[in-house]
Structure formats: C-alpha cells, structure tokens
Image (cartoon, grey):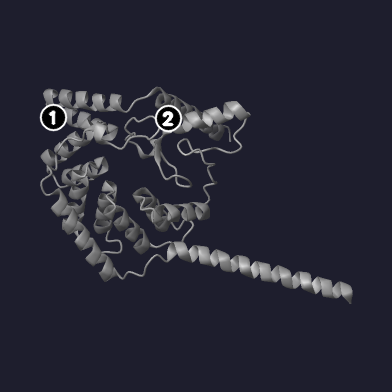
C-alpha cells in the first residue's frame, strides 16, 4: 500500500511537471508568433503610408547615384566594409545581433580549434559570449530579444522564419509584417523584399506599380539587390538602356553577377569597350576595398570544405 502511494505520488508529480513544461512551451511560442493581429486592410494601409514616407524621404536622391563602397556597413571587428554576398556575412543572431564578416568569424573559430584541439564552445567574435545552438526555437527566442531592441536584421531573419515555418507557425502575413518593421527601422533591403510581395501577390494583391515603387526606394537607399531586380525587370520588358544602367550601378559597387552580365552585353555589342573598361575599373576598386587576408583565408577554408563534401558525395 505504501509502495502504491509512493508510485501514485511520483506519477502525479510527473504529469504535473509535464503539463507545466507544455504550458511554458506554448507561452514561449505565443510570445513569438502572436505579435499583433493586423488584418490585410491594416497591412495595406501601413504599406501605403510606408511607401509615401519613403518616397518623400528619397525624392531628391538620384536613382542611379553611384554606391560608394565606403558607405556600406562595416564589420565591427576589422572595420572593413562588409562583403557583397549574403553568405559572406555572419549575423550573430543569438548574442549581440551584429553583422560580422566571414573572415573575422573564421579567424575566431580557427583560434578556438588551435587552443582547445576541438571546438567545444564557440564564442562570438565581437561580444565574446558563447554562441548558442542554432535550433529554430532557440533562434526565434534570440531574434525576439533583438527585435525588442529595434534590430532591423533580426526582423528580416524572423521574416524568413515565418516564411519557412522554422520555429514558428508558417505565415506569409507575419513574414510581411516583419519586413514592414525592418523597413520602418531603415533597412534598405526590406523595401525590395516588400516589392517581391507585390510582384507575387503574396498577402497583398499583385501590383506592378507598387512593386517598382518599392524597388526604386530600395535602390535609392543604396540596395545593390534592388538594382539587380530593377535591371531584370527592365531587361525582360525590353528596355535595355535602363537594364544596363542599373547593372552598372551594381557592378561599380562590386557585384560580380552584375559585372558578368555587363561582360555579356559587351560580347553582344550592347556595350562599348570604353563603357566596359570604366565599369571594370570601378568594380575592381570596390572589390579591393572589401578585401582582407582573413577574408581570403576564410574563402580558402570554405572552398576546401566544399571540395571535401563533394569528394565524400562522390564516394557514396
């Protein structure tokens, strides 16, 4: 009888603890996913206001003004302008919320390996706090904290989480809301991403004029991807002059995809040798302005890892 009572107590305690754990989990999820309850009409009104404000702010900016590479955000460690490619920028999402270059990131990892023999706990290269595991749930909790501090990149990352349903319930509406918040905080690339929603008719109705308006605001705010989007749009619609002009801005800023496309236009005799030479010089100057030994080393490490993975795949 005593044994039975003890077993019953243990059983009740187990279920109570399980219930509390589930309740805490549901609370943590709700604080992340239920940010607000905006209707589609609310979103469209907010988008119209956002666009109107942004167009007013950028009305005196030349759409084709050169993007000075020195105006780009710098890595807070090496103080060199961040790379063009997104994969070469590491967002420290579970600690300080800083963008650091892949060179500084890999340099820190290599130091940890040399010192310990293996990586037990990686530390952030900027704030030196231990880096947490990047599980969807942990990531979303960390992003929420950064969002409370008005970190626009955290909003952009949360938008991706909602779009994919990683750690939160999939919701295109929530994803768009996150883009709006990022744009309101000044994130240039949030504007062209909002343009994509209008292009695809996601959440809001398809609207080419608003799509272009958002792309152009983003381009005026020095977004290189926005210039690429605009170049593709005008190229598909047969306006090659506008297409080339947008590509030139992106290529001058150091975008390799834009530079390769410009080379293609030269081979097709759509571009003169003088124009190509001028663009090549500006492209190289921008590339040189973003180079460092650590970034070259990081690239070599990544290429070696890619080769090893390819070799392993071929063996299987």
* Residue 97 seen in this snapshot: yes
Q: Can you tell which of label 2 and label 1 is closer to the viewer?
A: 2
Q: How far across and how far down the image is residue 82, in percent?
A: 34, 34
Residue found 63% across the figure and 70% down from its top: 19
Position of the N terminus by quadrant:
bottom right
Using residue 146 as the reference point, say whether residue 211 is left or right of it: left
Which residue corresponds to mark 2?
103
Residue 261, relative to residue 7: is it above or below? above
Closer to the camera in the image, 84 or 148: 148
Residue found 37% across the figure and 24% down from its top: 292
Which residue corresponds to mark 1?
271
For marks 2 and 1, give the CA distance. Answer: 35 Å
Callout 2: helix, strand or loop? helix
Q: How far across and how far down the image is residue 259, in percent?
A: 24, 31
Residue found 16% across the figure and 45% down from its top: 234
Label 2 packing within 10 angstroms: few (<14), some (14-19), many (20+): many
């Amino acid at each position: 009888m005593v044994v039975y009572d003890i077993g019953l107590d243990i059983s009740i305690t187990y279920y109570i603890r399980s219930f509390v754990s589930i309740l805490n989990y549901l609370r943590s999820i709700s604080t992340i996913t239920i940010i607000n309850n905006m209707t589609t009409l609310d979103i469209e009104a907010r988008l119209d206001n956002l666009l109107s404000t942004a167009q007013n702010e950028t009305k005196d900016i030349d759409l084709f003004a050169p993007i000075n590479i020195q105006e780009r955000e710098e890595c807070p460690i090496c103080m060199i302008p961040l790379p063009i490619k997104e994969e070469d920028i590491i967002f420290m999402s579970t600690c300080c919320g800083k963008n650091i270059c892949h060179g500084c990131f890999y340099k820190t990892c290599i130091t940890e390996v040399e010192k310990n023999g293996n990586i037990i706990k990686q530390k952030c290269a900027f704030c030196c706090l231990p880096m947490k595991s990047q599980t969807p749930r942990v990531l979303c909790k960390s992003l929420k904290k950064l969002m409370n501090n008005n970190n626009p990149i955290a909003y952009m990352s949360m938008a991706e989480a909602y779009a994919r349903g990683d750690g939160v319930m999939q919701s295109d509406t929530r994803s768009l809301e996150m883009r709006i918040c990022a744009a309101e905080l000044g994130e240039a690339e949030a504007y062209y991403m909002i343009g994509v929603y209008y292009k695809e008719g996601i959440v809001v109705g398809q609207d080419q004029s608003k799509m272009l308006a958002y792309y152009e605001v983003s381009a005026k705010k020095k977004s290189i991807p926005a210039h690429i989007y605009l170049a593709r749009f005008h190229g598909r619609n047969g306006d090659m002059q506008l297409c080339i002009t947008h590509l030139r801005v992106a290529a001058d800023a150091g975008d390799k995809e834009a530079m390769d496309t410009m080379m293609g236009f030269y081979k097709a005799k759509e571009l003169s040798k003088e124009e190509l030479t001028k663009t090549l010089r500006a492209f190289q100057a921008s590339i040189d302005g973003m180079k460092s030994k650590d970034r070259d080393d990081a690239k070599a490490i990544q290429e070696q890892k890619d080769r090893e993975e390819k070799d392993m795949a071929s063996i299987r």
